Amino acid sequence: MSILREALKQSSTAKFIVHAARFLKAISIYNATGSTPEYGYHSGRYLYFATNKKIYSLYAGFENFRHRSIKLNIDSPVGVLGDMRQDGATQVLNNLTTQGYHKFDVRLGSEVCDTLAEFARMTPSKPRVAGYENKRVLYDRNNLVANLYDLDPQVLLENPIIQNLITDESLLAVAQAFIGPSVRLHNVAMWWSNADFHNVSKDSAAQLYHVDMDTIRWINFFFYLTDVDTNNGPHCYVARSHRESPKEVYRDGRISDGDVAKHFKPEDAVELTGQKGTILAVDTTGLHKGKPLVKGERLLMQIRFAVNYFGSGTPSKVNVNDKFSPEFLAKINKNANVYSNGYF
């Protein structure tokens, strides 16, 4: 058996075949159970780079073909992202296709951002550090135990502002235009970052360049809920790296700034700064990172839509209670294919 394992390590063809078989088996299990075996996720990551992303494009195309008859029920794609009727959505898609990101002209209102920031201060969150996996504490800059604090999806989805955002029809219109008919709400997250806790792993904090591969095809919307300048941890993106990148840096794992600088022009590494309320749409198959904070703090919210729930980070069911209004649940049911079998 050990001889066989060693032979597989030495043969790239054999290795590819094994990973392909595992990936296909995992898809079959996912289709039957809704769960992804861990080996399938890791084999998918291997095949992503081995096929120069083609395996993910093929799988996403298959999912969209299977669900080609699904149409979102959108009354008017005008909302938090602005007017996302034909011209507006086309501009967003063009920027995502060519650059890999889009910064919207409109912002969330200042009052909305302040309300969410107060909510995030008053709601216990999980410090992203060993020993706090099952503990929740209030984020307090004067009593820090980590540089990152994550709020739980349950409390986020109970918030009426976030409920309005995840069902916003301008958001849905862009998500479907980018992903296709098989669009699903994949992830809702919010976290604090701060510059005052110094025992930090840049790797675990996603503060080194990397490529996301949690699922098959997706789009991330980022909302800055505090002002973000060059010192407050802006999202950094290597423009056009989602389209063409050298293998030396477009690979699994974390990539240093120095390695990125060897293969891209300085102007390609873009810092996406903005006042509170700034909204970004990002294709994180491109090289990106969160810049380490030099001072202050940052509150960021992420809403991700994906083609399905294959992979890691599959949303867990929330407890639907009296904080989920009938009006909100009606919006969920209006586009049930987007929300069912995930959080709801």
Image: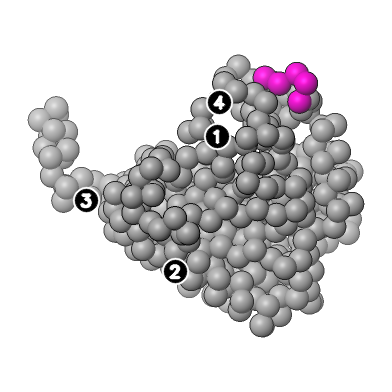
Residue found at x 64% / y 24%: 197
Residue found at x 73% / y 24%: 136
Inspect the magenta stretch and tell me whether residue 318 lies in it: no
Q: Which residues are magenta?
A: 141-146
Asked if disc 3 and disc 1 are in contact, CB closer than 8 Å, the reply is no
How far apart marks 3 and 1 lie (CA) works out to 34 Å
Amino acid type of the residue tagged 1 in the rendering: Ala
Inspect the magenta stretch and tell me whether residue 142 lies in it: yes
Q: In the image, residue 237 lies at what x, y percent?
A: 51, 54
Earlier along the polypeptide chain: callout 1 or callout 2?
2
**Which one is in front in this view, the residue at disc 1 or the one at disc 2?**
1
User: Can residue 70 be seen here?
Assistant: no
Q: In the image, residue 167 lies at what x, y percent?
A: 76, 61
Q: Nearer the viewer, residue 118 or 69?
A: 118
Check residue 200 in the rendering and tell me which mark sits there, or answer none. 4
Earlier along the polypeptide chain: callout 2 or callout 3?
3
Q: Quadrant of residue 291?
A: top right
Q: Nearer the viewer, residue 39 or 86?
A: 86
For mark 2, does the 10 Å Cα neighbourhood hold few (<14), some (14 to 19), or many (20 or more) residues? some
Which residue is denoted by mark 1 in the rendering? 205
Which residue is denoted by mark 2 in the rendering? 61
Q: Is residue 197 left or right of residue 37?
A: right
Q: Is residue 23 left or right of residue 71?
A: left
Amino acid type of the residue tagged 3 in the rendering: Ile
Q: Is residue 9 above or below residue 26?
A: above
User: Can residue 202 be seen here?
Assistant: yes
Which residue is denoted by mark 3 in the rendering? 17
